[in-house]
Image (cartoon, helix red, strand yellow):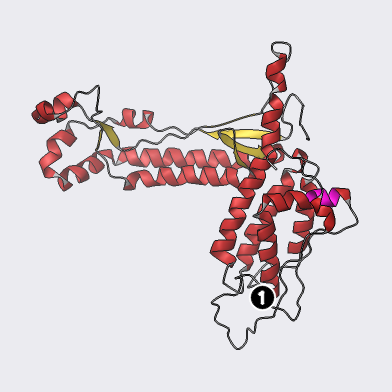
Amino acid sequence: MIHNNTAVLNGIALYHPMIEIWSGTVRVKRAEDLKEATDHLPPSELVSDGRKRIVRRDPLRPMLAIRKRVDRLLRVHGFPFMGGIAVPEAACAEIEARLPELEVEFQEAVNNLCANLVNEYEVLEQEFPSWAEMLRGSRLGEADVKARCRFDVVSHRVAAPDATQSPSAAKRFHKIADAALPTLLEDIGDNAASIYAESVKGKGRASSKTAAVVRRLVDKLGAFSFLDPRVDPMATALSKQLQSLPLTGWLTPVETATLASVLNTLADPQSLIQQGVAALNSPDVPMQDEPEATAHPMTDDLFVAVEVKPDLEPVPVAAPQALPAAAAAPVYAAGF
């Protein structure tokens, strides 16, 4: 088994978005809001009284959208790990360049909400006139709303406990390090399966935009080559397959088959790691190459239910070739 026994998981920065957004609700007060129904309610020790909405969801959406953009920024470079997003330290500069811009947008969205706070309160009170008095009595001030909104993203490195304090605790660090590669491959596999299902399966011809997304996925795999010696040959071989695909327009059926082959490989972590083992054990044996045109159509569902236009005759292509015998070499990563 390969262990990363260094004191620090070198090369990885762990980001934790700490973005808080007011829900537009406040807690229900039993003595005030439910006083007429108090005799019919279970004891508060058994049932919470819940929350009441005093602002619509719409004015909160800009802040929610910014939180999603932060998540996408981190996920483009990294993968979920230890409750955060693990990214290569080489990507930190790009991330740090974008975060201040997103923070400014977030604060502007908070300010816009507060500037229209009274109007927003009145919208809901007018929509529910029977409950207007209750809603009006629950209004929050601008300072209280701002206190419920926060933009922060923290980062740190993952390090082992001090061995001089607890040798056994320090030795357990390898369990975290060993989990990094399987977690990365699982995340990439899930993304690849989703791309294939949504943008390639049954379409016959994929777009160059889809190919660009797949390139970024392969680039992300290569960026974590420091995790394990098998990662680099995996990423290099897959990147080579994608080099011939066009940067604009639509892919031909053969090019689409190449893209599908790469996605199917990425979507199978076991196959991916086996190909990395094969490349290390037999460097002169190429990894699974792109499919070539033959007299046999693909056996999968790539071209199912595709309308064939006169100027777009599909070219029969072969199914992805079987892995070379060397790929059956033992797999060493934890979880595989």
What amino acid type is highlighted by mark number 1?
Pro
Residue 24: x and y in percent read 30, 38
Residue 253 position (above or below residue 135): below
Q: Main secondary structure of the magenta part?
A: helix
Q: Is residue 165 above or below residue 52?
A: above
Residue 127 point in image, percent of width and height: 17, 47
Residue 218: x and y, percent? 70, 53
Is residue 250 toward the left or the right of residue 277 in the image?
left
> Residue 28: x, y in percent?
22, 30
Is residue 233 in view? Answer: no
Q: Residue at x 66, y 28 (%)?
A: 158
Residue at the bottom extreme? 310
Q: Is residue 17 above or below residue 321?
A: above
Residue in the image at 72% along x and 52% along y: 272
Q: Which residues are magenta?
A: 276-280
- Name the residue carrying label 1: 253
- Residue 52 image-quadrant placement: top left
Residue in the picture at 65% in, 58% down: 214
Secondary element at tag 1? helix
Quadrant (top left, top right, bottom left, bottom right) of the N terminus: top right
